[in-house]
Image (cartoon, rainbow, N blue to C red):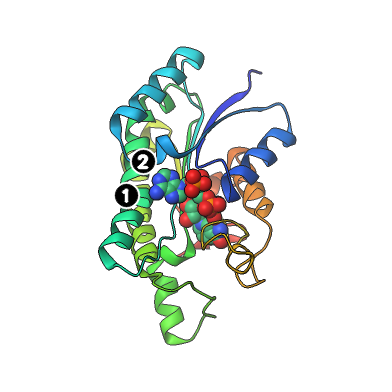
Amino acid sequence: MPPKIVLITGANSGVGLATTKVLASASNDYHVIISARSLSKAQTAKSERARDFVEKEFGHLDALINNAGSGNGDPDVYTRYKTCMDTNVIGPAVVAEVFRPLLLKSSNPYSIFVSSGAGSFGRAIERFNGTRDKPPEPKNGGAYHVSKAALNMIALREHQAYVDKGLKVFAMSPGFVVSNLRGTTEELRTGWGQAGPASVAGETMLNILDGKRDADVGKHVYKDGVYDW
Ligand SMILES: NC(=O)c1ccc[n+]([C@@H]2O[C@H](COP(=O)([O-])OP(=O)(O)OC[C@H]3O[C@@H](n4cnc5c(N)ncnc54)[C@H](OP(=O)(O)O)[C@@H]3O)[C@@H](O)[C@H]2O)c1
């Protein structure tokens, strides 16, 4: 069996790096193409150049993991919303659209949007009602929550539009894990000492790509189950 071709954005740190390591060490089943900043920049031309490269090298794509994300909490409201929307919404929308034709050439394609429980309306209501614990949150975190809610709609719409063509779409929440998302100080990287290892997110991704979560296609999944939208 030839390896499955997987492209992951934002793979130089945190969840993306951990996922790359888990996939690469799990077996020879996966050939992982990692991309850093340029593909996450919400620029169609750059995405198209990358798509042309993948098409020339491999002819198709088996899995696209839209992972790059920003937790920008700039004191300036325009700056934080612009950064979060560009990185967490427009970037994944562009990358998904540009690479979709290559995914549809795969016999078993996966499109995974790395989202967050922060983007779930159901969980937000539970937190407000006090029926769910409120995890620690960096200052000015609202733009991030809003952007992940929008990303969830991108995932749901892609699922509804392409499920009949065999595309398996997931929004995937990695959990509260160590990374640079909240900032680069030790305190922020470790989520005030409460964040788990990023490898946990990598294992969840491996389970999805191995087909173990296929019953949850079209949903917002996390390690142990499914979140409300
Ligand atoms: N860590 C958690 O607890 C947690 C929880 C829920 C969801 N997530 C999601 O997991 C995904 C990965 O994040 P992470 O936690 O691994 O954080 P991370 O370590 O900060 O990695 C984020 C990746 O996105 C890239 N990126 C950030 N801002 C960008 C921008 N403006 N333009 C282009 N690329 C940009 C980063 O590139 P640079 O390294 O060059 O900045 C990096 O490659 C994100 O979608 C995040 O929302 C994480």
Residue 128 visible: yes
Q: Amino acid at mark 1?
A: Asp
Q: Is residue 212 left or right of residue 55?
A: right
Numbered badge on residue 86: 1
SS for callout 2: loop
Residue 195 sits above or below residue 209 on the image: below
Q: Is residue 205 left or right of residue 66?
A: right
Q: Nearer the viewer, residue 167 or 199?
A: 199
Q: Position of residue 177 (x, y in %)?
A: 61, 60
Numbered badge on residue 199: none
Q: Amino acid at mark 2?
A: Lys
Numbered badge on residue 41: 2
Q: Are marks 1 and 2 in contact (CB under 8 Å)?
A: yes
Q: Residue furthest left?
A: 78
Q: Quadrant of the N terminus?
A: top right
Q: Nearer the viewer, residue 90 or 97?
A: 90
Under 8 Å from ligand 1: the CB of mark 2?
A: yes
